[in-house]
Image (tube, grey):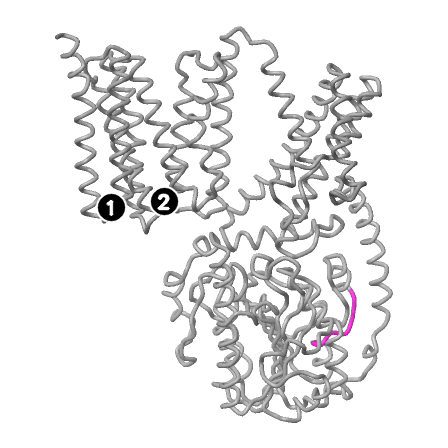
Amino acid sequence: MRLVQRRLRNLIGPLAGFACLLVLLGVLAATTGLDVAGWATGVTCGAGLSTLTARSMAHHRRDRLGPADRVTLARAILACAVAALTADSFGGRTPVALFVTLSTIALILDGVDGRIARRTGTVSAFGARFDMEVDSFLVLVLSVYVAPTMGWWVIVFGAARYVFVAASWAVPWLRGSLPPRYWAKVVAAIVGITLTVAAARILPDAMTTVMLLIALGLLAESFGRHTWGLWRLAGSPRGTRATVTSALAVLLVWAALLVPDHTGDLSPATFLRIPLEGLVFVVLVWVLPSRLARILALIAGLLAGVLMILRLLDRGFYFAFDRPFHPVYDAAYADSALALLGDSIGRAGALAVFIGAGVLCVALLALLALSAVRVTRLVARHRRPTIRIVAVLAAISIVPTLTGAWPVQQLASASAARLATQVRDDVRDQQEFERALAQDPFRDTPGNDLLTGLRGKDVLLVFVESYGRTALDSPVVGSALEAGDRRLQQAGFSSRSGFLTSPTFGGISWLAHSSLQSGLWVDNQQRYDYLVTLDRLTLTDAFGRAGWRTVAAVPSNDRDWPVAKTYYHYDTVYDRRNVGYVGPSFSYAAMPDQYTLAALQRLELDKPNRGPVMAEVDLVSSHTPWAPLPRLVDWSQVGDGSVFNPMPAEGDSPEDVWRQPDRVKAAYAQSIAYSLDAVSSFVQQRHDRNLVLVVLGDHQPASIVSGNGASHDVPVSIIAADPAVTDRVADWGWKDGLRPDADAPVWPMDTFRDRFLTAYR
């Protein structure tokens, strides 16, 4: 009878908790519209909670819940409600504020139950276990909620505890018990807080990712220390630590030799190959004296680390620029990358990303060197089994290749050979560039003989950021081009269009600008840095020599651009500091393209009694991250730009867009369409028959939009009201209209200067 009464008392607390959960789920259903999946998840979790709590109370001979246990039970109820909202989120929008509020309350209560237990003298093994399991369950739920937005690797947070329990079933010494550690509670709190911040979406994704990685490192340290303590408590089971360490060392070296350098090559099968260099390394270690073997291992590990870092950089450059990393001159882009990242996610987030990348590089070098030395020791201890394993792996790798049953594997050493060849070619490239600089057919042409076919015309050289051939595949861009043709026809303008091949891809647009202007192929920073120190004739120089006033509009520059004066020789440069803009920025774009064009008109084209103007205009609303976007307003309402104030909040955020490749492509197309609409609308409203425009893209967008292996072609159009202007390029084979034919001529961008100067001389 007493046993029955005790069991009934055991059920009172869990059943009361289950009833409270049902009430809470009902409140959520009434306020948020909790669906069937949410109800089912909440009820299932609540039932499991009640059952496991009752069984644990019986196991620990507890008749009732203590004061601290009731607080823990309240946390468990909140965790079940959070689980219900998480399940609900997969079928629709979740009230993030409510989700974060419940999670935050549960985390705050985590610091209350332990304090109550100590003050009331009710600290117990049951309470500690109950508290730990509720912590683990809440972390699991939060990680499931965050994973779809931050990546499914976040599930590691929630799975850690349960993987450890599963491992203890196979490894008995993991079931031991250690005294509670306060640091473990701190780590659990940090993990919960980090996941809640990630769920709240209050920080840029890059900064959130860094926070999650730091929290993951703390969690790994906590579990590692706990495992180490259990191992020592069990009397240090022989060979366990050494086996695990050796296995991790072998896997790290294996992965370093096999990681591909191209984004499209990454798949699980990539790491199932056999690295032949690794087999050669093992053989050398096997035959060399132990001292020489360790020296070889240390050097080989550092080299493997360097090659792995270069491959990771190659992957990033292929993704962004469709080419590998060039160590000779690409390091110069670090400042530009930091500035661009800062414009997108903030200076603090950009610095966090760069610091994290630096720490990762140092860690890879150290870990691979230590791993290689570890492999050496492993070979020395197991010489005979090692050589047998190497022989078998070599046969598995070589025989199918020789018979043609399996293609030749890309060797890690090929990366080293390519690196050496690349450095040699980069040095030769500079020498070839210097020879090309000496050839300039227009260098000594007097101003009176330059650009005679454009006398009296205002000429705008308009670069539309990331306007590549890929954009023409988008219906949205196609509609913008058709609408642009209609606007131009209504204003009495016509156009001809073709293609140019850009020297860059995905970014680094100043290489394209200098190639078009100088008539030289400037496809790397080394060439650019050398070119701008010289006095090479540019299109801007040609117009200036022929009597035009030359200006540049670079709307996102917020500091002096020395090259504008020392190399391009612009009379005036307009940037974000001197065009009177007081409106909002749109990610990278400091101002909308419409304002840039309106400011040029106000500051230059509307001046009375002036001479002709030549202007390079950089339109950057289509610059990555392509969100949020402005919209066109009536040109009479542009004013100081304050009319654009509400628009950033009305558009998509970069964080929302960049979670799905399809949304990125859609946002890119919309940004190009906006820029093209701004240009054609500008021409229509100005209605100046002495206006001539050369409109072109600077490069294709990154491979997330263009795809792997896309061309470097960009559309180019000449727009004018005077038929004599377009007639001069009639023999170019360009199509009438703003959209070039698929089979239109494609010229390298560096040939444009000479063709243009020849056509209009």
Q: What residue type is labelled 2?
A: Ala
Residue 575 shown left or right of residue 538 in the figure: left
Which quadrant holds residue 502? bottom right
Element on which disc 1 rests: loop
Please give the range of residues in magenta.
534-540
Q: Where is residue 124 in the image (x, y as percent from the top left)?
A: 29, 12
Q: Which amino acid does label 1 sit on?
A: Leu
Q: Does the magenta stretch include residue 536?
A: yes
Q: Name the residue under label 2.
A: 200
Question: In the rendering, which numbered label is found on residue 367?
Answer: none
Mark 1 is surrounded, within 10 Å at the Cα level, by few (under 14), some (14 to 19) or many (20 or more) other residues, namely many
- Could you tell me which quadrant the C terminus lies in? bottom right
Q: Nearer the viewer, residue 524 or 149?
A: 149
Question: In the rendering, which numbered label is found on residue 34?
Answer: 1
Q: Which of 213 and 688 is in front in this view?
A: 213
Residue 94, relative to residue 619: is it above or below? above
Residue at left offset 61%, top offset 79%: 460
**Mark 1 or 2: the one toward you:** 1
Residue at left offset 80%, top offset 54%: 426
Residue 439, relative to residue 456: is it above or below? above
- Could you tell me which quadrant the N terminus lies in? top left
